[in-house]
Image (spheres, helix red, strand yellow):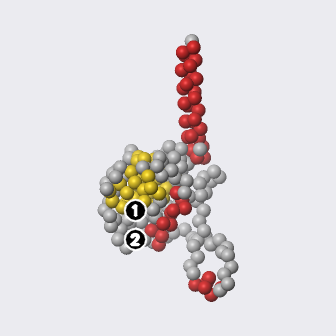
Amino acid sequence: MKNLFGLFLALSLIAIPAAAQNHGTSAHGVGGGHVPAHGPAPHPGPAPAARPAPAQQQSRQPQEQARQPQEQARSYSDVKGHPDAPHVHTKGDQWVGHDTGKDDAHYHLDHPFEHGRFTGGIGKGHSFRIEGGGPSRFWFGGFYFSVAPYDFGYCNDWAWGTDNIVIYDDPDHDGWYLAYNVRLGTYVHVMYMGNG
């Protein structure tokens, strides 16, 4: 009887932290180990109307401020508890934030796929553990990637030595892939940099 109780106690001690780890964002319908069955569909038309830019600090030279383009503020927190980053809903695999279409200047490349194409496996069934690096250069299995500069802020909470990601084709932006973080349910645009 003591052995049975000891086994039960040991299993409970293992199960409680695992359940707490998975509770995180998955309780809100994002992340928690969910892997989308497919990537986003191509955007069907023009991008949604731009939101007004946030108020900027006053400049001493108003003419200089007027000449500088203002970045549009964007919020991705579509439901209470969802991250303010591009993400995928666990129900229905809705890719929130992939709606700017082909003409998004943030993802324009003069030479798409200049380092070749990623051949390590695309989509569900091909999960990779990030082995190191950071947004400007990370790797797994000898494959190297770089996050789009515009997306750097959306991967601040990624664990660059332990998180699992799945790579999906980007149907709208030539030369880019989408790296989906399985733990968080968020994604960023990434460029394949080759293999070593």
Q: Quadrant of the N terminus?
A: top right
Q: Can residue 55 be seen in this view?
A: yes
Q: Reading the chain from its start, which is encountered first: label 2 or label 1?
A: 2
Front residue of this view, candidates 160 and 19: 160
Q: Which of the 4 image quarters holds residue 154?
A: bottom right
Tell whether 60 sits left or right of 169: right
Query: Which percent across, then down, holds residue 189?
Result: 45, 61
Query: Which percent across, then down, holds residue 147?
Result: 45, 61
Front residue of this view, candidates 190 and 96: 190
Q: Is residue 41 visible?
A: no
At x 54%, y 26%, the residue is: 11
Query: Residues at badges 2 and 1 in contact (C-beta under 8 Å)?
Result: yes
Query: Which percent across, then down, holds residue 174?
Result: 38, 66
Q: Mark 1 points at which residue?
A: 191
At x 33%, y 59%, the residue is: 194
At x 63%, y 51%, the residue is: 81
Q: Which of the 4 image quarters holds residue 116?
A: bottom left
Q: Mark 2 points at which residue?
A: 109
* Mark 1 element type: strand
Query: Which percent across, then down, holds residue 59?
Result: 66, 81
